[in-house]
Amino acid sequence: MVDVSNDFKRLAIQSGRYVYCKIIAGNTTFLDDRILEFDFDDICHPEWVTFGTVCPNKFTFSVIYNGELQVGDTVKPYISFDNSEWCPLGVFYVARRYVRGKKASITCYDKLYSLDAEYVPSIQAPTTTDAILRDVCETAGLVCEDFGYDFKVQEIPLGHTLKDMIGYIASMNRSCAKLDRNEKLVLRVPTHRISYALDTENFMDYSRNLDHSSITCLSCDTGNEILVSGNGALTSTIEFYNPFMTQRTLDNLLAMTRSVTFYGAEITMQGLPFLESGERADFVEQGVDMYAIILSEIDYHYDGALTAKIYSRNRSYTDATVHKEDLDAALDEIRAQLGNVCIKQTNDNALTLGASPVTAASFEFLAKARNTFAQIDLNFTADSASGMTFNIDLFVNGEKISRTALHIAAKQSELLHYYYLADNLPKGANKIEVQISTPQGTAVIPKNQLIATLVGKGLGGGNSGNVNDRLIITEEFPKYDYLREESALAGFTESPEFDGAQETE
């Protein structure tokens, strides 16, 4: 949290407060008469609370200006509530600028944005992590006053960026690396609680998880092995990568964080510019209940007024946006719970059909109850020079069920559809396999031209009494005009072996 006076904090939480803004960009100072708006993204945990993140802050602003700002120019924004005491928002550098007419739109980042160069150590191993961080800061031109604990390091890994090395040392100190508002590198421990409470009286909107998160397990990938300390579910586990980590250090980190609990939350409120991401705070609900949250990210927005959106990201936290992958996962979970199965297969290679049966699809699945059913749909394009007979052999848990279909080759390529319903399946493991053969001649199913789908529902075979469900196989033949159909079917007499086959007009 930025060190400001109590008067500043008192003015900040007042309703009807007056907000002053000042942006020093290059050699130009912009005041409220020329500042249109700005967005300040102060971020520590892009996904969820963890250790070792190194996230640059982003500042974008629009002003009335037709001059010239150069890439790399320094930008320093400030907020005040009395036009006397100013709270800094950070030190940024111009990355992109766009000027049209009398309006300029500028995008800036802090120094962490440009630390993707490879770290070439100027010190020799064995050494300590604090010595490595000093060397990294000297190389990157960063000012740092707290270099963390002096963990012993037997060798320095090569091929890592400056930002990577800062992140590794930060996670050794159970922290995340940030540049503070005065451009000093700090190792911010998200489990440390700041002495400030957010009151819901200043909130415009908020949502909070009903359950809190506890850190009961740490999992670290060293590149050579996965080290684990403690145990817990995914929602209570912190995962990170660090080639310096040892089991002893990981156990010590867990001992210092095991008692930490916090809630996931999303809060829209008056902007309090002295709040910084990566810290743990309390919010007071209805003046009575206090809940610990971690300030994973704060989005400040200024357009004459100053608002903020605060995110506390624990593993159980879900944002308001519905993502397709989340819906797919939820549907898979529902299907599994209901005993439903939906499996699709296709042919990765061309299938050459001849007298010997070729496996077109093979499904293995679990039935959650007895007397479930599974529907098999087989669609494929067959290339052949003339009409021929296709034999379809289905094996339902080893029992062979054979059907024969006539392929009328009005064209070289024909699309065929086969359907089968297997009912009264036993509870537990089931297997259904489909094989195709051509007793005379050959045909080819080109690559990715066969789609086999199995859909099953574990509801005790609820539709098995419907006579339509007992039709074993139907085939769809291409449509022909009347002259072509008459020619193709000339002399054809339906045979008993085609019982159950239907021609679709």
Image: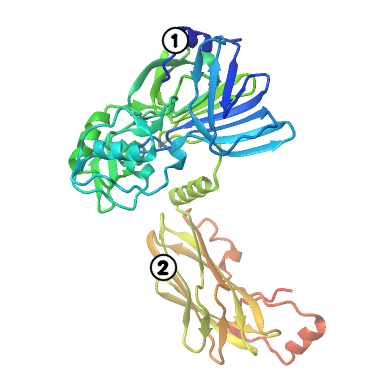
Q: Quadrant of the C terminus?
A: bottom right
Mark linked to residue 431:
2
Q: Nearer the viewer, residue 187 or 94?
A: 94
Mark linked to residue 239:
none
Q: How many marks?
A: 2
User: Which residue is rendered at x = 53% and y = 90% of the image?
Assistant: 439
Instruction: Using the numbered discs, state the Cα–Cα distance from disc 2 to disc 1 in whole angstroms.
Output: 72 Å
- Give the amino acid at mark 2: Lys
User: Which residue is rendered at x = 41% and y = 47% of the image?
Assistant: 117
Quarter location, residue 378: bottom right
Measured as percent of width and height from the top left, residue 386 is found at 65, 90
Q: Relative to 17, say whether 369 is above or below.
A: below
Left or right: 442 in relation to 195? right
Measured as percent of width and height from the top left, residue 422 is found at 49, 66
Left or right: 313 in relation to 474? left
Quarter location, residue 2: top left
Q: Secondary structure at mark 2?
A: strand
- Give the amino acid at mark 1: Ser
The residue that mark 1 highlights is 5
